[in-house]
Amino acid sequence: MGAVKFRVAICGGGIGGLSHACALAKYPDISVNIYESAAKFSPFGAGLGIWPRAWNVLCALGVDDDMAKLTTVSPKNGRIRTFSFRKSDQSNGFTFGNLFSRGPLLTFHRPQFQQVLLKHLSPSCQIHHSKRLKSYSQSRDGGPIHLSFEDGTIATCDVLIGADGIRSAVRNCLLREQAEIARNQGRLKDEQELLAGRDYLSWIGSVAYRALIPVERLKQDCDKGLLALPTTPTMVELFLLRGWTFVILTIFSLSQYVGTNVHMIVYPVSKGHMVNLVVFHSQPELQDMPYQGPWSKEVDETELFNITQFENWEPEVRNWLKYVRRPTLWAIHRVKPLPTYISENVVLIGDAAHASSPHQGTGAQQAIEDAYFLAELLGDPRTTLDTLPRALRVYDSFRRPWTQQMSDKANANGRYFTLQYDFDFAKGETAAIIDKLQEMFGLIQDEWEWCWTTTVEDSLKEALLRLEDD
Ligand SMILES: Cc1cc2nc3c(=O)[nH]c(=O)nc-3n(C[C@H](O)[C@H](O)[C@H](O)COP(=O)(O)OP(=O)(O)OC[C@H]3O[C@@H](n4cnc5c(N)ncnc54)[C@H](O)[C@@H]3O)c2cc1C
């Protein structure tokens, strides 16, 4: 190994942390250590979805061939009907909108996704398990950063990446550090805002019940026609005929089952061997209130069945729910817009920086994008130990506004999916209900299309130019 230009410590070996380590693998002059609080990578976990924007990043990381083996869908571009939106909280549910995307939503089982990232790490990258970061300290002169772990051990690095998820220890420390800087500079209002750092984490008033169902358990109902296995559309190639371009699509897409304050989605994972079922229950009046109890726990399925009067919902939904056993409940929290993602040589990525509602399936995607974007700035030959702060400033100036804006879009869609709209869907006339649902669907589509109409590369190119200007 040649000379090392600086040492990166990644706190957190989740989707963002591993993606970042993977993206740094092509820069042998950067040494990488990952500190993960868990004793080992768990073989358990739910599903996650990847849109074309993040898929392009996975291609740039060189993990696409291995990832493609884990999914049922061909990750090719083309116009695809991804989701059908159904109004389901009535016995005769109906479709009110079909979401078309350019390229499919690829769905994965999280532990398998992580295994692929692990496979592509540089052999020199070291992973330290059972290392829960407590705090860090750094001097203002760019000297090494000192890390302290809960087990009493310490480590040092030149750049610290806070990829430690929604309850980030790095974020808490970073906000305290920035508050101190603000006080020293006489910016007392900023200091107060930063000191209220813990309030940046808030419950969105919604919980998710998640269950994985092995497909063989569904066979009987599928054979009787009571259930249709969810399959993301398989696209058949483009073909040309007399100067016209044609695309053949299968007619199948995934359904989003929408009702007042309740929303359900079902999609295949593990190459179609499992179905991931998620039911969201929203209580808008509780938004920003403290959530009582553990944020994630296994619950009895009767708790899920009691959240609404499912007996009045369309049969398809009731048939799905029959298969749920001991779902995991997740209280959905978000990180409110932070004033910064950086402090000297410390930087936040993924949920630590901008956890949002999962209604666009983009939390992991945003973490992957941050990871890649930052790695390209760090790996650039113009970034050295001396110019590190400049690279982090560029990261912050591009990724913070973007991720915060996209998080707002996910939050907005979360509200639409549970029929939080300026219309009472329980009382209106049928024609008016349909009109309003279609109007709302137009907004859903507008909020979502960034996932397939934009690329990370475009903003990265601009950011790399900024390394010269800054
Ligand atoms: C119900 C639900 C459904 C979702 N569905 C999707 C989806 O379909 N698509 C999608 O893109 N996203 C989805 N998400 C969001 C997605 O899971 C997260 O946005 C994503 O995992 C964030 O990645 P991350 O690396 O930032 O954090 P994480 O994946 O949470 O990783 C953080 C890591 O840091 C470790 N850690 C924590 N604290 C410390 C510490 N102090 N020291 C050291 N290590 C620490 C943790 O053990 C963990 O390994 C969903 C989320 C929920 C709740």
Image (cartoon, helix red, strand yellow):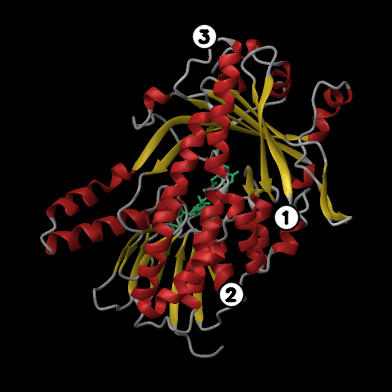
- The residue under label 1 is 77
Q: Quadrant of the N terminus?
A: bottom right
Which residue sits at x=71%, y=63%?
64
Residue 384 as seen in the image, left or right of residue 180: right
Q: Nearer the viewer, residue 375 or 259?
A: 259
Which residue sits at x=29%, y=42%?
199
Give the image location of residue 57, x and y in percent: 61, 63
> Is residue 157 in view from this perspective?
no
- The residue under label 3 is 427
Describe the element under mark 1 as helix, strand or loop: loop
The total of numbered circles placed on residues is 3
Which residue sits at x=81%, y=20%?
226
Q: Identify which amino acid the numbered label 2 is placed on.
A: Ala
On the image, which quarter does residue 67 sit in?
bottom right
Give the image location of residue 207, x and y in percent: 50, 30
- Residue lying farthest to the bottom in this orientation: 2
Give the image location of residue 240, x and y in percent: 86, 56
Q: Nearer the viewer, residue 291 or 366?
A: 366
Say which label, 2 or 1, has the lower sequence index.
Answer: 2
The CA distance from mark 2 to mark 1 is: 27 Å
